[in-house]
Image (spheres, rainbow, N blue to C red):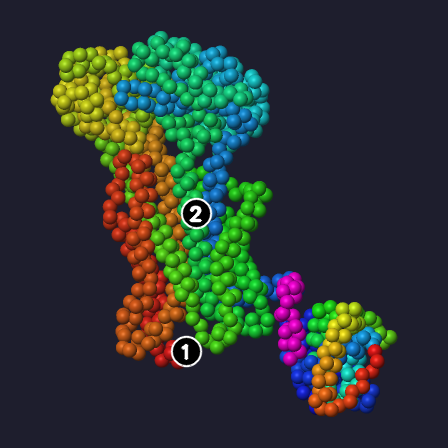
């Protein structure tokens, strides 16, 4: 049975299939059809016949479409109208994009992978930089807060300290009215206990009572104006309070400092100090607690050189740091000039704005680990490079693939797609990929954050609040990336003319080839630079940790007894008892350990001409067997020794640099010269070889070493053990019997030494891993590109094969494409990476050499990676049947 | 049988004239043309609409949807002032050509009064 309605509906839907019909048109035609059918039926035709005739009358749909199409293509106005009509087509564009992506699964995967990874890397670096820049920003008065730093000029050099003399803070506001507040802060360690809770705490701070006037440490309990007034007051952080007091209210209770045998009353509980602060602690003790000790110091000018205190000042509005520095000159003149003359050491004070401290302050005695603006530059550059590599991959792959899609383009143009529309569509595709990669990248960053935190030694949180602040930035980032990567391919792809494409004749533009070659060479160059960087960094870090410091440092445990007089009097007994432990090989004592900067004291010495001269020289106070235990070589005279009991008073050992400083022609000439330091008069009895006692960054300074029983503070214990926790526990037990009143404060010398390079090491490690990532992404792109070039190369390979070339020869011919670029990249990269590495290595006077082999290795590695990545493609091409290839042409 | 070229050339003035007379919809127009030409002019019905749309775009005619008694929606076309002017133009051209042929082929023409 003929169903008229159904037939009409079918006819309508076949019309709809053609672009160029708007809904209004179709309705009109439908009406026409119906009218015609009606008419014929009236005249007596059967419905089916009427229908068929009517359809024929209306003409082939094809023709109709074309007619209507010719109509609308002509003017610009209608083109734009079409674009607007296309808006509802957007979802279908999306479908088309997804479909075409799916068809090119492999390439889409490569693109998305590379982009997502690179975006994740950028995101992580961004979070890192954001964190670094945010240090100390939470203090409301931050723009008025400065730290006073001290430059001390001693003969031949100037030392730069983050520390100041103890008397500055109290005197400053009196002398300079624009200083509203001056706060002293100093560090100490203590063994604290409350009931059964007992912990060795490092990094407690004691501070003047106006601490909270300057810094915004929020007190949850207690009065900030009063908390640190009275001696023996302590403010705990929330976590410390919980640690010792659990859920109890600690206010008013007492906590015991076992080492100093005093109790502190809790006068406040503060919120935990945020991690982005250049100093942080869980305990603030009132400064007044320690003032009595200060009054017991021997009077004398050297008290002005006891640099153990950080001084922070809050300035009046409008009074700048520069003005403060000027006023400090007068201040110094007024209060310190006498002492300076006597000590022959001269001060210049300067004011550091709070926000610059974490960022870029690297003076002696910094209160915490500070960041490095150079690192931030390096990281930014690397993350941008990674992104660039991924984007280049994208562009390369897209343009390379463009030929495969040329047919698609040609076809769509025949049914009327405009160049503009096509370009927009391809651009849309790449934006889509970019946004998708962004989403995946964010996810990856989120998952990798803990790993990154441990690598960078930070505690960055993936704060979703960040998305509020930076969400727009992030989205535009994805958008821009998509546009950047997609604009060139979209441009050239939409240019294809249907006729040329469909006929199968297609020559890629020379321009396109050249661009691709340039981009790939760029990628190679960047990869080589990064590989060189990675190798050099790796070498340097290795070098530093293995560097022979000049003394043997393995497995030395240090016990700090802090100048305890009882122990100082009986130190030899302690040594004997400790030596009795089977794991203990050797014991000696000193005032500092070799990972700490030495003291620096004025010296009076005898010159070659027999005159008396002054100098300031670093010094360690040591036990008579110190140089023996640390295997420090003696190059003239002898070391201190228990064989010479007189060595305990006035026997000095100096290092080679001292010999030079004091003007002795040779080490032997130093022996027996008069030498006085820190109140002890004596002679030089020996010269040792230079060894590193300050951070590896500097040249070895002059050093003297001598014995002074009331200056000993540390036992240095060399142990050999396979279970250090057991050894430590046993040593602690011995300690308890010897000095029950003194806490067992131990540390490892190794750790102290490694700490000094934490910053550079961290930076190096981060660069290392990110460079690897960059190279991986580059390889990824290379893989895709190789596939494409292989496709191009098929015909040539086929011909070569027929002309008798072997597989080897074809592989070589194929690889030549890439190797040539490799070589160019290599040449370009050498000067750049050389320069960059030189800059970085300048941070360390002791450093690996930049050998040529490093560059050769990097170049070779790149070639190797190239070979591996394209191996599959090249072999496949070489072994293909040439006939089948050529037949397809 | 009238050749394609003439059919094409005459479409525009034909439609404009029909519409000048009164407004009309697609099917109606085609029927009128068939009538007038005594089946000489064979238009593929589908050919009409593109021309109508072009004429509309050029501003010579306007369209509006109206509901017929049978309840069906129909698109009606009407001539505009611009269209009238255009029609005069076309008419003049045709008559001019006509008069040339008339002279050549010795025809007597009667031009109805407008």
Q: Position of residue A548 (x, y in %)?
A: 24, 35
Q: Are marks 1 and 2 on the same chain?
A: yes
Per the rendered image, the range of residues in magenta is A63-84
Residue linked to disc 1: A889
Q: Which of these two is toward me, A768 or A271?
A: A768
Disc number at residue A383?
2
Q: Is residue A142 visible?
A: yes
**Chain on which label 1 sits:** A
Q: Mark 1 or 2 closer to N-term?
A: 2
Q: Which of these two is toward me, A566 or A826?
A: A826
Mark 1 vs mark 2, CA separation in Å = 44 Å
Q: Which of these two is toward me, A829 or A258?
A: A829
Horizontal side of residue A159 vs A670, given as left or right? right
Q: Residue at x 44, y 16 (%)?
A: A327
- Name the main secondary structure of what is drawn in magenta: helix
Q: Position of residue A576 (x, y in %)?
A: 25, 22
Q: Which of these two is toward me, A186 or A397?
A: A397
Above or below residue A862? Residue A583 is above
Q: Residue at x 48, y 20 (%)?
A: A313
Q: Position of residue A261 (x, y in %)?
A: 43, 16
Query: Are there few (<14), some (14-19), or many (20+) residues within 10 Å of tag 1?
Result: few
Q: Residue at x 53, y 69 (%)?
A: A409
Horizontal side of residue B57 vs A375, given as left or right? right
**Chain on which label 2 sits:** A
Q: Residue at x 59, y 73 (%)?
A: A415
Instruction: Give the quadrant of the C terminus of chain A.
Output: bottom left
Horizontal side of residue A388 vs A68, given as left or right? left
Closer to viewer: mark 1 or mark 2? 1
Disc number at residue A512?
none
């Amino acid at each position: 049975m003929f169903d008229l309605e159904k037939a009409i509906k079918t006819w309508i839907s076949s019309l709809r299939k053609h672009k160029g019909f708007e809904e209004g048109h179709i309705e009109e035609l439908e009406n026409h059809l119906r009218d015609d059918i009606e008419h014929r039926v009236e005249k007596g035709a059967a419905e089916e016949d009427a229908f068929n005739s009517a359809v024929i009358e209306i003409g082939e749909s094809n023709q109709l479409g074309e007619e209507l199409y010719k109509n609308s293509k002509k003017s610009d106005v209608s083109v734009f109208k079409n674009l607007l009509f296309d808006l509802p087509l957007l979802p279908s564009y999306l479908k088309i994009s997804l479909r075409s992506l799916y068809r090119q699964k492999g390439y889409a995967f490569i693109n998305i992978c590379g982009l997502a990874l690179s975006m994740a890397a950028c995101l992580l670096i961004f979070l890192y930089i954001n964190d670094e820049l945010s240090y100390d920003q939470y203090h409301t008065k931050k723009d008025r807060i400065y730290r006073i730093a001290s430059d001390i000029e001693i003969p031949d050099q100037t030392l730069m300290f983050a520390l100041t003399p103890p008397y500055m803070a109290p005197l400053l506001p009196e002398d300079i009215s624009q200083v509203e507040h001056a706060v002293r802060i100093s560090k100490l360690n203590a063994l604290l206990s409350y009931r059964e809770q007992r912990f060795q705490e490092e990094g407690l701070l004691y501070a003047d009572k106006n601490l909270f006037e300057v810094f915004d440490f929020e007190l949850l309990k207690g009065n900030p104006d009063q908390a640190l007034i009275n001696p023996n007051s302590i403010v705990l952080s929330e976590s410390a309070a919980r640690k010792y007091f659990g859920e109890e209210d600690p206010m008013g209770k007492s906590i015991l400092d076992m080492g100093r045998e005093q109790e502190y009353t809790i006068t406040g509980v503060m919120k935990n100090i945020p991690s982005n602060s250049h100093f942080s602690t869980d305990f603030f003790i009132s400064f007044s607690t320690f003032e009595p000790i200060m009054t017991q110091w021997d009077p004398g000018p050297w008290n002005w050189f006891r640099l153990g205190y950080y001084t922070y000042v809050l300035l009046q509005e409008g009074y700048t740091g520069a003005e403060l520095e000027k006023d400090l000159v007068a201040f110094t003149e007024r209060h310190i000039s006498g002492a300076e003359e006597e000590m022959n050491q001269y001060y210049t004070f300067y004011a550091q704005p709070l926000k610059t401290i974490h960022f870029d302050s690297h003076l002696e005695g910094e209160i915490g680990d500070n960041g490095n603006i150079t690192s931030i530059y390096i990281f930014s550059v690397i993350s941008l490079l990674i992104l660039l590599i991924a984007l280049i991959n994208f562009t390369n792959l897209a343009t390379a693939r463009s030929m495969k899609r040329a047919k698609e383009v040609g076809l769509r143009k025949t049914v009327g797609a405009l160049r503009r529309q096509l370009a927009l569509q391809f651009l849309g595709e790449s934006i889509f990929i970019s946004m998708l990669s962004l989403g995946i990248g964010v996810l990856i960053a989120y998952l990798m954050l803990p790993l990154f935190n441990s690598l960078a030694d930070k505690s960055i949180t993936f704060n979703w609040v960040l998305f509020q602040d930076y969400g727009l930035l992030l989205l535009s980032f994805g958008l821009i990336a998509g546009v950047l990567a997609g604009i060139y391919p979209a441009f050239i792809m939409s240019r294809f003319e249907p006729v040329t494409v469909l006929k199968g004749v297609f020559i890629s533009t020379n321009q396109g080839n050249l661009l691709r070659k340039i981009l790939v060479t760029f990628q190679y160059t960047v990869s080589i630079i990064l590989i060189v960087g990675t190798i050099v960094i790796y070498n340097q870090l290795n070098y530093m940790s293995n560097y022979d410091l000049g003394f043997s440092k393995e497995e030395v445990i240090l016990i700090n007894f802090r100048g305890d007089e009882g122990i100082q009097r009986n130190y030899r007994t302690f040594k004997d008892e400790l030596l009795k432990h089977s794991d203990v090989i050797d014991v000696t004592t000193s005032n500092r350990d070799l990972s700490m900067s030495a003291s620096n004291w004025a010296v009076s010495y005898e010159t070659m001409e027999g005159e008396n001269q002054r100098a300031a020289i670093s010094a360690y106070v040591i036990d008579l067997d110190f140089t023996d235990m640390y295997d420090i070589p003696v190059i003239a005279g002898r070391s201190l020794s228990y064989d010479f009991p007189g060595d305990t008073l006035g026997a000095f050992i100096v290092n080679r640099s001292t010999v030079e400083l004091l003007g002795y022609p040779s080490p032997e000439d130093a022996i027996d010269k008069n030498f006085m330091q820190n109140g002890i008069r004596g002679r030089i009895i020996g010269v040792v070889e230079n060894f590193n006692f300050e951070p590896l960054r500097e040249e070895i300074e002059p050093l003297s070493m001598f014995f002074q029983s009331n200056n000993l503070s540390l036992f240095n214990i060399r142990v050999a053990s396979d279970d250090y926790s057991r050894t430590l526990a046993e040593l602690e037990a011995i300690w308890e019997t010897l000095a029950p009143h003194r806490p067992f404060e131990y540390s490892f010398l190794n750790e102290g030494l490694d700490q000094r390079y934490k910053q550079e090491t961290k930076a190096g490690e981060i660069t290392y891993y990110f460079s690897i990532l960059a190279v991986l992404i580059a390889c990824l792109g290379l893989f895709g590109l190789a596939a494409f070039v292989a496709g191009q190369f098929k015909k040539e390979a086929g011909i070569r094969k027929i002309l008798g070339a072997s597989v080897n020869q074809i592989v070589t011919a194929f690889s030549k494409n890439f190797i040539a670029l490799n070589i160019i990249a290599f040449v370009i990269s050498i000067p750049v990476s050389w320069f960059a590495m030189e800059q970085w290595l300048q941070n360390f006077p002791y450093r690996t050499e930049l050998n040529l082999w490093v560059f050769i290795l990097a170049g070779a590695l790149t070639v190797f990676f190239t070979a591996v990545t394209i191996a599959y493609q090249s072999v496949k091409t070489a072994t293909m049947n040439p006939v089948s290839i050529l037949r397809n042409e | 049988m009238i050749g394609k070229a003439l059919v094409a050339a005459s479409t525009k003035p034909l439609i404009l004239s029909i519409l000048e007379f009164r407004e009309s919809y697609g099917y109606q127009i085609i029927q009128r043309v068939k009538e007038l030409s005594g089946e000489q002019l064979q238009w593929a019905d589908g050919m009409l609409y593109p021309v109508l749309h072009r004429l509309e775009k050029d501003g010579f005619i306007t369209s509006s949807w109206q509901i017929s008694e049978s309840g069906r929606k129909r698109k009606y076309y009407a001539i505009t002032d611009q269209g009238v002017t255009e029609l005069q133009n076309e008419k003049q051209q045709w008559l001019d050509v006509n008069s040339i042929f008339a002279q050549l082929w010795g025809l007597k023409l009667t031009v109805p009064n407008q």
